[in-house]
Image (cartoon, rainbow, N blue to C red):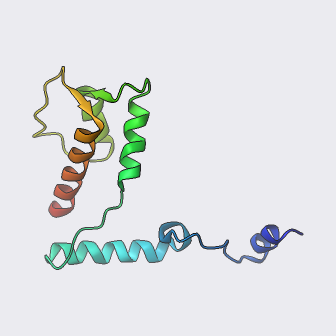
Amino acid sequence: MVDGEQRRVSGASPPADGNAAEDRPREFLVQALEKVKDGRRAEGEYPNLMDEDNVVAMFGLLDVVGQGHITAAQHREALKTLGLSTEDLQIEDDAIITLEVFTEEVKKRMLESWAVH
């Protein structure tokens, strides 16, 4: 048996690569919830469960042709998919949304969402 196979069979964890979410998901979630509690009490920042790499990847999925922008309709749907409010979104239907605008809007709305919950 190869070492990797032996580890899986014996139930030992694969080697840690430094990613707490993958290596110890329960610990990661507990820490994230503690940050939410601290943020609500204004004792710390809210956790960032969706980092910038995730936002960039989502934008890339929407910008399939690689034009460097998405439509206002795609932007609204992406926000809704993330469970973020679009009620006060003030973007014209013919607007072109760049990665920078998309990233800032997602970050802003995620912080607003954490503050409400």
Residue 31 place in picture, x, y as percent = 37, 77
**Relative to 42, is 99 above or below?**
above
Relative side of 74 to 18, left or right = left
Q: Would residue 70 be seen by someone viewing this image from the given angle?
A: yes
Residue at horizontal 26%, vertical 41%?
Answer: 100
Q: Residue at x 20, y 56 (%)?
A: 113
Looking at the image, can residue 84 be seen?
no
Tell me the quarter of the image containing the C terminus. Answer: bottom left
Residue 49 spot, x, y in % from top left: 35, 61
Residue 103's spot in the image, x, y percent? 27, 45
The image shows a total of numbered marks equal to 0
Q: Residue at x 28, y 47 (%)?
A: 83
Is 21 on the left-hand or right-hand side of 79? right
Residue 91, picture quadrant = top left
Outermost residue, right direction?
Answer: 1
**In which quadrant will I find the N terminus?**
bottom right
Residue at the location (28% across, 75% down)?
35
Is 20 in front, or is 17? Answer: 17
**As drawn, is 82 to the left or to the right of 16?**
left
Q: Residue furthest top?
A: 94
Expressed as whole percent of the image width and height from the top left, the position of residue 38 reads: 21, 78
